[in-house]
Every structure is written in C-alpha cells, then in structure tokens.
Image (cartoon, coloured by chain):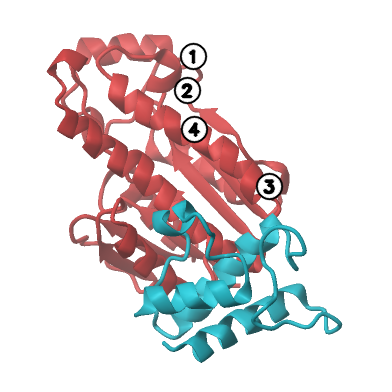
Chain colours: A cyan, B red
Amino acid sequence: MNKEEALQIVIDAVKEYIDDDSTTINKETILLGNNAVVDSIGLVNLIVDIEGALSEKDLEITLTSEDAMSRRKSPFRSVETLSDYIVELAN
Amino acid sequence: MEKIMIITGSRKGIGRFLAEYYLEKGITVIGCSRSESDLQHKNYEHHCLDVADEKAVQKLVRNTAKKFGKIDYLINNAGIASMNHSFLTPLSIVEKMFKTNVFGTFLFTRECGKVMSKKKFGRIVNMTTFAVPFKLEGEAVYAASKAAITVMAEALAREYAGFGITVNTVAPPAVQTDLIAHVKKDKMDKLLQRQAIHRFGEAKDVANTIDFFLRDESTMVTGQTVYLGGV
C-alpha cells in the first residue's frame, strides 16, 4: 500500500465519522490532543473504522499494537502520521 | 432477522450444548475449538484455532463480519481448568490457563466488540465459576483466571455501553462435564452443600440465563454476574 492510498482511506474514514461538510479534512487534520476533530472515543471509533476499511482490502492490520502505544510520538496524531503508520505496517 | 453468534469452545460440554441449543432457535452459530467438531448443521461453521492466538481470532471475527455483515452475540465459553495445590502447579499450567481463559476472552471480546459497535448492538456473555466466590483451595489459579474475566466484564460493560453492547457473566452451577471429571465425589458433595441449591445443574440452566442476557429487551442488563445454584 502506498501513502496516497493510505491517506485516502484515513481521510474517507474521518469524513464519514465526523459527517460535517463544513470541516475540511486533509493530511494536516489533527486526530489527537488539542484541536483534534474527534474526541478520545471518536478516535477509538475511527481506528475501528480504518481497520475495517483495510480489512476490506484484505489487509489484516491491527493499528493498536504495543509498538504504536509506546512510541514517544503517537502515530495517531494526525491524518498524515496515521497514514504513514499504516504504510509502515502494510509493507 | 438472521442472528449471528460466535461460541468459543463449542466442540464439547456446555459450549456444544449451547451451539445445538441456539441452532435449534434458528441462530447461525460460528463455533471454534482447538480441534475439529462433529457437529453438522446447515447454520453451523466450525473453526479450529487457539483462542489466545491473536491473529487467528482476528481472522475468524473479521471473516465472520465480512460474510454476515454483523455479529450479534458472543459467548466466551472456552476455558480450561487445572485443579491442584499451588505447590504442585508448574508455571506452564498457570500460563496456559490464563492464555485460554483470560487472553482468549479478551481477544474475542475486543474483536467482536469492534464489529458490534458498528451496528450499535451486541451481547457478550462470559463464563466464570463458583470457585471465585467460594475461593476453593486447589483452584487458586483457575479461580484467579475466572475472577479476572468477571472484573474485566464489569469494566468492559462500561467501556462498551455507549456502543449498545452489553457484557455479562454467568457462573454455571456444578455441572457434570469434563472439567470436573477428575474431582472426587466427596469433594463434589461438599461443594454442592455450599451452593444454595444442593444439586448438580444442567447446561440448560446456563442457556436459560444466557437467553435473558441476549434478549433485545435486556438493554439495561450489563456488568452483571449470575451465580447459578446460589452462592
């Protein structure tokens, strides 16, 4: 999976989850902490949605690995960091 | 509407009974155990796996969700017991019991919970044991693993409430299955005397309790543990 594909999956999932046309979702969109477009439960939902979307493409990936949780910089910070992380896991 | 149920440890004992019972009720049952099952039914699928194998559990749950579009019910029935004095219990047995009883329950609950959250509906039922409240000597590790399941269910009931998923636990009464096949009669008699109802239960008593947990109307029933036979 390449970066563009991963970005598209994450952006689509965020758009579908927040369901608000007035909010622009792009690779800079923040997912964790201040200014995040989702709250903590929203992020949980989003991760489940993204795992589901990856599974649809026959990519059986668990995003919440010990590695992800223990990184100094969380891969869930933004659409772009999450997309990078998906590419890393998929390849 | 078609209902989809996963039952772990469905090859024999209470799990087998539950599989047949819910198939009879028209529910599609996906069962699993470490070895093959001879249960044949048009609405039954059996998968061989170790419930503590994360990848295998993910694969089974995701494939089930893909095939049926949802999972309504999960019965975390798979469990192993080893009854012995702690001085005579090797760590490998402790690890094995926690892997199957606790890790397996956690993995299936987590994966099915993700699927159920999409439909805002789910019923998860775990199995515990009267060895927890009775704190039976010789069953320290088994009881500890089941106590972990009970407390985990109570916490998960809160985590999952917003998703329309309930998590409950049932403790079968003393039921004559393989789990207690090697327990001496006088020990079993003593145990039965400690229950409010001094007799063996049957798998149908467990099914009756699970029926209550599964009902669509049981939306407020979560984080509960029912000890059959009375403790």
| Viewer-nearest residue: B208 or A74 | A74
Chain assignment, label 1: B
Tag 2: amino acid? Gly
Kind of residue at disc 3:
Ser
The quadrant in which residue A89 appears is bottom left
Instruction: Report which quarter residue B33 is drawn in.
Output: bottom left
- Viewport quadrant of the N terminus of chain B: bottom right
Q: Are marks 3 and 2 in contact (CB under 8 Å)?
A: no
**Mark found first going from the N terminus, 2 or 1:** 1
Residue B218 numbered mark, or none: 3
**How far apart are labels 3 and 2 at the CA level?**
22 Å
Tell me the residue at 60%/34% (across/down). B224
For disc 3, the neighbor class at 10 Å (few under 14, some 14 to 19, many from 20) is: few
Where disc 4 sits, the SS reads: helix
Closer to the observer: label 3 or label 2?
3
| Front disc: 1 or 4 | 4
Residues behind callouts 1 and 4 on a single chain: yes
List the residue tagged with mark 1.
B196
- The chain identifier of the residue carrying mark 2 reads B
* Residue B67 makes an appearance in the image: no
The subunit carrying tag 3 is: B
Q: Nearer the viewer, residue B117 or B5?
A: B117
